[in-house]
Image: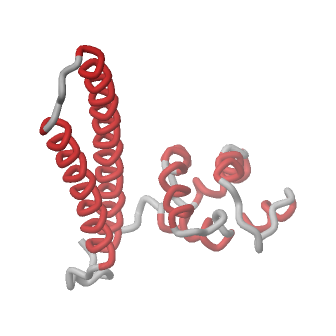
């Protein structure tokens, strides 16, 4: 029924849909009815659009295919039991968000430190004071910070590709 509605409204089942198209689809009364009838909370699905499409873009896909859209709807049914793979996926998304936030915070702090160092050098040159070792220590601290960020990102990649040995099909 969903495929028929989409095709009658110009959506081709063999092409991907963008986030904006996804959001427009979910507010169409007929689509809302179809999705709700299978037990999916349409508002929750709309709220999750950002996360869904961030994951799609990270995977390199141009958008959401009809098959993925239908699968997503079926996976979002309220009577589905959460599985270990679902929890692992949530953990991966949360971990990614935390690492990304930490990276942004570290970049902001590094930018602020760089600006302060630049201003301090300008002031010291103006008053004729040599900063000497202070400048080298600040460079060392900045290099250590960059190395720590790279290590955090690598550990996230390792955690994503590693297998903890859990049965990803098991029910919780």
Answer left or right for 46 relative to 124. right
x, y percentage for residue 106? 28, 42
Q: Is residue 169 visible?
A: yes
Instruction: State which quadrant residue 9 falls in.
Output: bottom right
The image quarter containing residue 14 is bottom right
Quick one: which residue is furthest to the front in this view? 128
Q: Is residue 144 above or below residue 114?
A: below
Residues 135 and 171: in front is: 135
Q: Nearer the viewer, residue 141 or 96?
A: 141
**Measuring 27% from the left and 53% from the top, which residue is drawn there?**
146
- The quarter holding residue 117 reads top left
Which quadrant of the figure contains the N terminus?
bottom right
x%, y% of residue 42?
Answer: 55, 48
Q: How many marks?
A: 0
Decide which of 6, 115 is in the foreground and name it: 115
**Which residue, as the protein is rendered here, is positioned at the far top?**
127
Image location (x, y in percent) of residue 162:
27, 80
Residue at x-position 35% and y-position 50%: 100
Q: Is residue 20 left or right of residue 87?
A: right
Looking at the image, which residue is at 61% across and 69% down? 61
Which residue lies at the image location 61% right of the left edge and 57% below the top edge?
A: 35
């Amino acid at each position: 029924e969903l495929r028929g509605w989409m095709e009658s409204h110009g959506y081709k089942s063999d092409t991907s849909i963008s986030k904006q198209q996804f959001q427009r689809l979910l507010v169409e009364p007929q689509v809302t009815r179809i999705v709700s009838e299978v037990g999916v909370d349409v508002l929750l699905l709309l709220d999750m659009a950002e996360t869904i499409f961030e994951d799609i873009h990270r995977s390199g896909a141009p958008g959401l295919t009809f098959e993925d859209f239908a699968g997503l709807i079926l996976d979002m049914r309220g009577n589905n039991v959460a599985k270990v793979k679902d929890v692992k996926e949530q953990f991966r998304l949360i971990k990614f968000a935390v690492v990304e936030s930490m990276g942004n915070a570290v970049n902001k702090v590094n930018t602020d430190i760089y600006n302060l160092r630049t201003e301090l050098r300008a002031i010291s040159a103006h008053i004729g004071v040599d900063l000497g070792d202070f400048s080298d220590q600040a460079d060392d601290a900045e290099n250590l910070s960059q190395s720590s960020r790279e290590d955090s990102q690598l550990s996230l990649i390792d955690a994503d590709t590693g297998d903890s040995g859990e049965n990803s099909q098991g029910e919780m």
